[in-house]
Image (spheres, coloured by chain):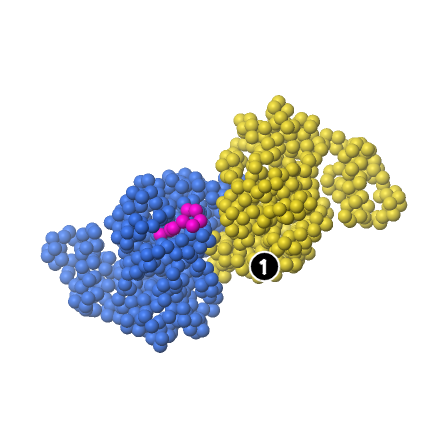
Chain colours: A yellow, B blue
């Protein structure tokens, strides 16, 4: 762990254990530098991280204090304990029943998988889309065939480079959203009947993809802050013939955890030694709250075993359906699978995003989006603290737009979902996220919508329903 | 067969057998009415059909004569004879090697699968796309989730109705092009290892889809004019446990054949009696040359066994990647598969096409497009007559944009393809279209590009290469 992370973890521990109380001052930067023999920049970085998490705040003329609302903040959930056998996946019916509800615009979308579309630069994108379409070379329908628009792939390669990852333009395949990319990558590295390791809880889309392809899921214990538990994974790899892993390294859906840098290194080494390909579902990585972007597992990959999948749907252009895969040694295979799956991806949408990325407003948009999501997370955390049973545990992700709640054991999340729906509110109940339908007392809430009285009331209502169970 | 078709077939037979020679008059309409006791409209319909096929032409003051170039027209190919066993499919490498070439814009695209993008109303579509995107309800990203835009599905249902097919709006699922629709339908009705009946020769995309899903292909003899040979099919269904059929009822790729109305009826009855689902790949049906649009097999379907797949990519908006499925009793299943495969389809593209279909210029565009393709077909048929070995047989499709050539047995189409590529010309060699790599002396040529000296020269060059083999 880096020095500043160590310091941040230490101060956070003091806050979470109650040694430091809401409103109380924490040691000044100067003081801390002297006491711990740290540089000013290290201490500042640690404090900024704590500020990003909402645990401390800067007060004019009094330095940093513990955030006022911190007293209301529930504890984080415990790590999942997973069954140790692979499971045939059959989640489709459950998941679809619940998804049908999230499409209903009359419901308050706490169960939705999407952030508010109002957070995105849709007018500027629309302008570009119209302009690009009017001036498009008619032959782009042929030249943008898989692997896709060269200029868009160049822009994506440029962003990889900025994130410290070297991906040749030729190895990027444009897809109709990340979901298609993930499916194609899964197809490239598995045969029906194979075992695939997934997180526990896992993104239900991954479980559905496994189900479609007739694969078995091996659910690996996953920490709500640090992601996949590597000791468990290592044991499981010794016992099972795992053909691939499908993990979300950053802001995992639904837990929100991100793997620490040292775990990322260890995971890639672990898989390389066994020649196991890793599908990295990395659609939330742009939505980080700290100053520093998470580095994808792909950054550690020297052997081409990491199939990295990204998307613009969560961070820039929902509805444009543009995603991509950087599938390493499987690039040509994925390119061919893309062709046989759906020929190509909407040409004007590819070119419009390429233009947007080229003109330079993206960073500004992302900063505002991250800010909005972080504010909304704090608002929802506080509301949960006010309205949910005191034993409730809540994740505290450093990015993305999901909270994971572990409710008292008596709460049946599926029943809670039915009762919430009757009151006009959607939630995402825990069993959606497990091939074994575990997490019966957990729910995922979406804070991707600007805070409003309606959302506050909805959180309060779900809290009351949970308390009554 | 209807009366006018019988008459047309009879006159065509006289032309093809040489009884009527180029430039010679055929009986006047009045004469024919009297002689055959037919109504004037029946005779006119027959003559218009022959005119559409390019076999006769109207001369001012002398009535109809046999077309002048008919003497140069090669004969139609014979019906395919297929192996009677199901085959594991492994065409991917061959097909991709050839497709890579068609993407190369330096090559004359005789092997291309796409018509010229210049034939489409791209400027108007671009206008609509820009306008729609600017005024789009941001929540359309949620409401246009599968099954897709309601307005677009309504417009498609309206067109079905005009073609005499009743499809409820609710049963239409929008997809990222027809290829995705076809894949999802195939997935809905098969399990890996199943046998699927396909035409012989078949669209290579169907073979690739079978290969991806681990299915076995049963190749059914197919007539270059009338499509699937039903007596053979019936025998094969008795012998094999066929789980699904994948047929193109109209302007089959690559042969160009269309099933006569009575065959369509018989096929649907045949499959209904055995409860075998039929995937109807119907992406060329708007490109008919006669006065009368072909009626899809779906029109005969009362039991929901026909999964009809369509697209706007060949007739209106290449590059927009909008297709659809009307999967009958499998509609909900296909909708769910669409969600798990790629979540949704580009929202602005869906809405732009809905607007285009609503404003009424579509019919006018289609008439011009059909006219252009028919003219180009005649031009290419004549060029083939001039430049290819005399034993060459050529299909004479009444729609679409492909010709199927059966060359002298000594010609190796794969070698011809290599030699043509060396001269800057792409072609589509026959073995691409067969799981057993039959049709070694056949090629498919694309006439979807406005005629030019370059294309004339390319046809001449391929003809010379073939003659030299």
- Magenta segment: does it hold B193? yes
**Residue B231, above or below A380:** below
Magenta highlight: main SS: loop
Q: Is residue A200 magenta?
A: no
Q: Chain of mark 1?
A: A
> In the picture provided, is A62 more to the left or to the right than B449?
right
**Left of A18 or right of it: where is B47?**
left
Q: Pick whichever, B238 or B52, lies toward us.
A: B238
- The residue shown at (69%, 35%) is A78
Q: Is residue A198 visible?
A: yes
Residue B62 or residue A87, whichever sits in front: A87
Q: Which residues are magenta?
A: B190-197
Where's the C terminus of chain A, which quadrant? top right
Which residue appears at 27% of the width and 47% of the height?
B265
- Residue at (45, 52) in percent of width and height: B214
- Is residue B56 rendered to the left or right of residue A328? left
Q: Is residue B387 above or below residue A7?
A: below
Q: Determine crowd level at label 1: few under 14, some 14-19, many 20+ residues with C-alpha closer than 10 A.
A: some
Q: Residue furthest left?
A: B35
Residue found at x 21% / y 54% = B5
- Could you tell me residue B206's position as x and y percent? 40, 54
Q: Quadrant of residue B69?
A: bottom left
Is B433 located above or below residue A18 in the figure? below
Camera-nearest residue between A394 and B197: B197
Q: Residue furthest bottom?
A: B468
What residue occupies the far top of the structure in this picture? A468
Image location of residue A364, percent across then percent down:
66, 49
The quadrant where residue B438 appears: bottom left
Secondary structure beneath dot 1 equals helix
Residue ID for mark 1: A329
The quarter of the picture where residue B385 lies is bottom left
Question: From where the camera sits, is residue B452 visible?
Answer: no
């Amino acid at each position: 762990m880096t020095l500043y992370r160590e310091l941040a973890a230490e101060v956070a521990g003091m806050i979470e254990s109650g040694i430091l109380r809401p409103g109380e001052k924490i040691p000044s930067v100067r003081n801390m530098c002297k006491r711990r023999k740290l540089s000013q920049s290290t201490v500042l970085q640690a404090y900024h991280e704590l500020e990003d998490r909402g645990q401390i705040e800067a007060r004019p003329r009094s330095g940093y204090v513990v955030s006022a609302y911190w007293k209301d903040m529930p504890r984080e959930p415990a790590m999942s304990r997973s069954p140790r056998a692979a499971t045939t996946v059959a989640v489709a019916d459950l998941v679809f029943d619940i998804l049908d509800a999230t499409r209903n615009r009359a419901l308050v979308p706490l169960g939705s998988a999407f952030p508010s579309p109002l957070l995105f630069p849709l007018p500027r994108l629309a302008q570009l889309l119209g302009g690009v379409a009017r001036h498009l070379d008619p032959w782009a329908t042929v030249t943008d065939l898989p692997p896709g628009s060269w200029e868009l792939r160049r822009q994506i390669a440029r962003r990889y480079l900025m994130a410290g990852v070297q991906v040749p333009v030729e190895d990027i395949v444009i897809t109709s959203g990340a979901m298609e990319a993930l499916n194609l990558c899964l197809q490239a590295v598995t045969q029906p009947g194979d075992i695939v390791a997934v997180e526990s809880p896992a993104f239900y889309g991954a479980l559905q993809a496994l189900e479609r392809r007739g694969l078995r899921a091996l659910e690996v214990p996953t920490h709500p802050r640090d992601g996949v538990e590597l000791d468990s994974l290592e044991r499981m790899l010794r016992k099972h013939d795992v053909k691939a892993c499908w993990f979300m390294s950053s802001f995992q859906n639904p837990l929100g955890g991100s793997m620490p840098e040292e775990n990322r290194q260890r995971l890639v080494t672990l898989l390389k030694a066994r020649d196991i390909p890793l599908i990295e579902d990395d659609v939330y990585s742009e939505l980080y709250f700290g100053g520093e972007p998470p580095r994808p597992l792909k950054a550690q990959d020297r052997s081409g075993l990491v199939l990295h999948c990204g998307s613009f749907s969560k961070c820039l252009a929902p509805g444009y359906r543009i995603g991509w895969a950087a599938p390493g040694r499987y690039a040509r295979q994925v390119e061919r699978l893309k062709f046989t799956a759906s020929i190509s991806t909407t040409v004007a949408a590819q070119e419009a995003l390429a233009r947007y990325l080229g003109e330079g407003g993206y960073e500004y948009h992302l900063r505002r989006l991250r800010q909005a999501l972080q504010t909304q997370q704090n608002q929802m955390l506080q509301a949960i603290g006010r309205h949910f049973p005191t034993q409730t545990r809540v994740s505290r992700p450093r990015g993305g737009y999901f909270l994971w709640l572990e409710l008292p054991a008596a709460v049946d999340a599926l029943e809670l979902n039915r009762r919430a729906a009757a009151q006009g509110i959607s939630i995402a109940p825990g069993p959606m996220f497990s091939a074994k339908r575990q997490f019966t007392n957990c729910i995922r809430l979406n804070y991707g919508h600007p805070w409003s009285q309606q959302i506050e009331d909805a959180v309060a209502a779900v809290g009351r329903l949970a308390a009554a169970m």
